């Protein structure tokens, strides 16, 4: 049985092709099957800033703990079950100036197998749990 979702905010940096900028992000987790935790990471980044740095589909979030976490722009195609696929994927899934001005980048981590692992990797949850 899955438990409720816990969310927390963090401050880190986004790294696109070696160019870094401060960013805020949200992490959330829920208990998965067994003793695992499913962690979702979401952040918003300015489209033009990303494009100017040669962003295609992925970047790196440097989290509060110093972890380097790959984050991806999925073009909205898998979160909505693909129902808008014909609208979104007109440029091969890559970011361009026809996309929204603020771009969501996401990651999923299911490597934490204990609450201790979770707190070490994501200190953002300290106040939330």
Image (spheres, rainbow, N blue to C red):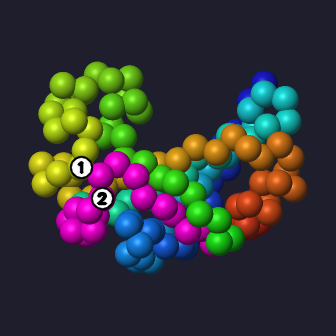
Do the residues under discs 1 and 2 have CB atoms within 8 angstroms?
yes
Cα separation between marks 1 and 2: 7 Å
Number of marks in the rendered image: 2
Magenta stretch: give its range: 48-64
Looking at the image, residue 25 sits to the left or right of residue 20; the answer is right
Residue 82 percent location from the top left of the image = 33, 24
Q: Secondary structure at mark 2?
A: loop
Determine which residue is flagged by label 1: 95
Determine which residue is flagged by label 2: 55
Identify the residue shown where x is 78% and y is 54%.
118
Identify the residue shown where x is 18% and y is 25%.
86
Q: Is residue 57 magenta?
A: yes
Q: Nearer the viewer, residue 19 or 4?
A: 19
Residue 69 percent location from the top left of the image = 57, 57
Looking at the image, residue 14 sits to the left or right of residue 9; the answer is left
The answer, for residue 9, to whether it is visible in the render is no
Identify the residue shown where x is 22% and y is 36%.
92
Residue 88 percent location from the top left of the image = 21, 35
């Amino acid at each position: 049985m899955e438990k409720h979702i816990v969310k927390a905010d963090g401050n880190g940096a986004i790294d696109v092709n070696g160019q870094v900028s401060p960013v805020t992000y949200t992490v959330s987790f829920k208990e998965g099957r067994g003793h695992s935790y499913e962690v979702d990471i979401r952040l918003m980044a300015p489209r033009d800033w990303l494009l100017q740095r040669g962003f295609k589909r992925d970047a790196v979030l440097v989290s509060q703990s110093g972890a380097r976490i790959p984050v991806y722009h999925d073009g909205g195609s898998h979160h909505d079950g693909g129902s808008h696929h014909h609208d979104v994927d007109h440029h091969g899934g890559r970011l361009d100036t026809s996309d929204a001005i603020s771009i969501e980048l996401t990651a999923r981590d299911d490597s934490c197998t204990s609450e201790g692992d979770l707190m070490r990797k994501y200190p953002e949850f300290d106040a939330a749990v």
